[in-house]
Image (cartoon, rainbow, N blue to C red):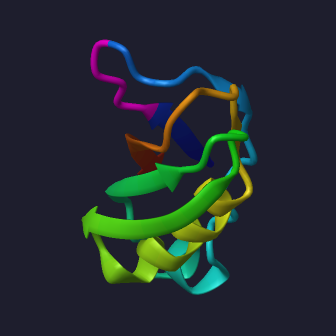
Amino acid sequence: MALAIPACAAGARPVKSRVPPVYAEIAKRLRIEGSVSVEATVDFFGKVSDVKTLSGNHALAASAEDAVRKWRFLSAPDHSTVLVEINFAQ
């Protein structure tokens, strides 16, 4: 099971829709757990335009990035950067 928790700072953009990350089968078999911190750049329309892993296990990072790329945020007058923490646990 993987839980996605936006680490929102004051004034951060609200999430319109979330896509849960897929827990990679190899990570499950090896019992790899932990948090992945991801920085998402969001455009005017609320679409994620760029994602970068800041910290966390590399075996889980790709899944976290793929999920956050599919998230949608509320529209805003400017681009913004949102920090998201994805927790992977079995």
User: Looking at the image, which residue is at 45% across and 32% down?
Assistant: 6
Report the side of 2 relative to 82 (left or right): right
Q: Residue at x 30, y 73 (%)?
A: 57
Q: How many marks?
A: 0
Residue in the picture at 43% in, 46% down? 87
Which image quadrant for residue 72? top right
Q: Vertically, is 35 above or below 78? A: below
Image side of residue 60 versus residue 42, left or right: left
**Residue 50 at x, y percent in the picture:** 51, 67
Secondary structure character of the magenta stretch overall: loop
Q: Which residues are magenta?
A: 6-10
Residue 39 at x, y percent in the picture: 36, 55
Q: Nearer the viewer, residue 7 or 14?
A: 14
Q: Nearer the viewer, residue 84 or 63?
A: 84
In this rendering, the answer to whether 64 lies above or below 44 is below
Please tell me whether residue 85 is drawn above or below residue 8 in the rendered image. below
The reply to whether residue 18 is visible in this rendering is yes
Is residue 59 one of those drawn in magenta? no
Q: Would residue 89 be seen by someone viewing this image from the given angle? A: no
Residue toward you, 67 or 82: 82
Furthest-left residue in this view:
55
